[in-house]
Image (cartoon, rainbow, N blue to C red):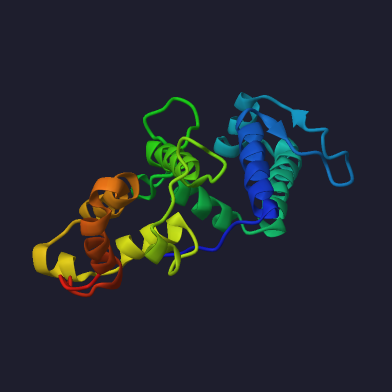
Amino acid sequence: MKIARATPEDINALCDLAFAVDAINAGSIPPAEGGEDGEWEHIGAGNLLNILHDDTPVSLQKESLDICRRCLIRLLEIAESAHITRAAGNLEAVFLPSNRIIDLEADTLETHPSIDQGWADTARLDWLADQENTIGKVMLPGWCSGEYDSLRDAIDAIISSPTYLERKYGKTQSGRLFVIFEEIFNNKEKAAAGKDVTRSLITGQPINKEQP
């Protein structure tokens, strides 16, 4: 299921809310109306809890209500400034194990190993397909380069297409990739035999033994 992406305002509001709750829990209260935003007043965690839990003397009821009002107003102002639940939902999605975005076994915030592996594989494919790289420089066979613009396009076609050989022999994705790379890397010895097999893998058509 897709969820809406949080805006920077949503994220900032969630951070502001967390800061405000932590500050209040530590015994600080927001400034009075018209006061400087950064001038929180520290009355002590014990005093704040006493105000909330104990029977407040009549002489302090007005002050206690003012403290509670200031705290509640600050929290509501933050909540109304953006969509906090959207930011919280995004955070939950990032840490959901099945999404494999964050490495939940790391002590610090790190990307999931599968993402790191994906970047590494991308770098390997870039190296193979780089025409300036005299060591890699994988060239598509002539018939294949006429149908596909790049090595990536050819590989995508192999991976995504249910082919004749796959249906008949149960070829795996890795097996189909092996055949085309076998032709690319060993074209001197196996190009003639591999061409028909590779064309069949790409097009999904049966192998024609009489085809030149």
Q: Is residue 56 visible?
A: no
Looking at the image, is 159 positioned above or below residue 18? Answer: below
Q: Is residue 181 left or right of residue 122?
A: left
Which of the 4 image quarters holds residue 97? top left
Q: In the rendered image, which quarter is residue 156 located in? A: bottom left
The answer to whether 195 is drawn above or below residue 67 in the figure is below
Image coordinates for residue 107, horizontal then vertical, percent: 44, 25
At 30% from the left and 47% from the top, the residue drawn is 188
Q: Locate residue 29 relative to residue 54 in the image: left or right.
A: right
Residue 196: image location, x then y, percent: 23, 65
The N terminus: image quadrant: bottom left
- Judging depth in this view, the residue of 14 and 109 nearest the camera is 109
How far from the left and from the top, in percent, is residue 76?
Answer: 68, 54
Instruction: Give the image quarter of residue 212.
Output: bottom left
Between 28 and 37, which is closer to the camera in this rendering?
37
Asked whether residue 137 appears in the rendered view, the answer is yes
Q: Residue at x 17, y 65 (%)?
A: 166
Residue toward you, 126 or 83: 126
Q: Pinpoint residue 110: horizontal percent, then vertical percent.
A: 48, 33
Tell me how many marks there are: 0
Looking at the picture, does residue 195 appear above or below residue 62?
below
Left or right position of 177 against 123:
left
Determine the residue positioned at 57% across, 53% down: 87
Q: Residue furthest left?
A: 169
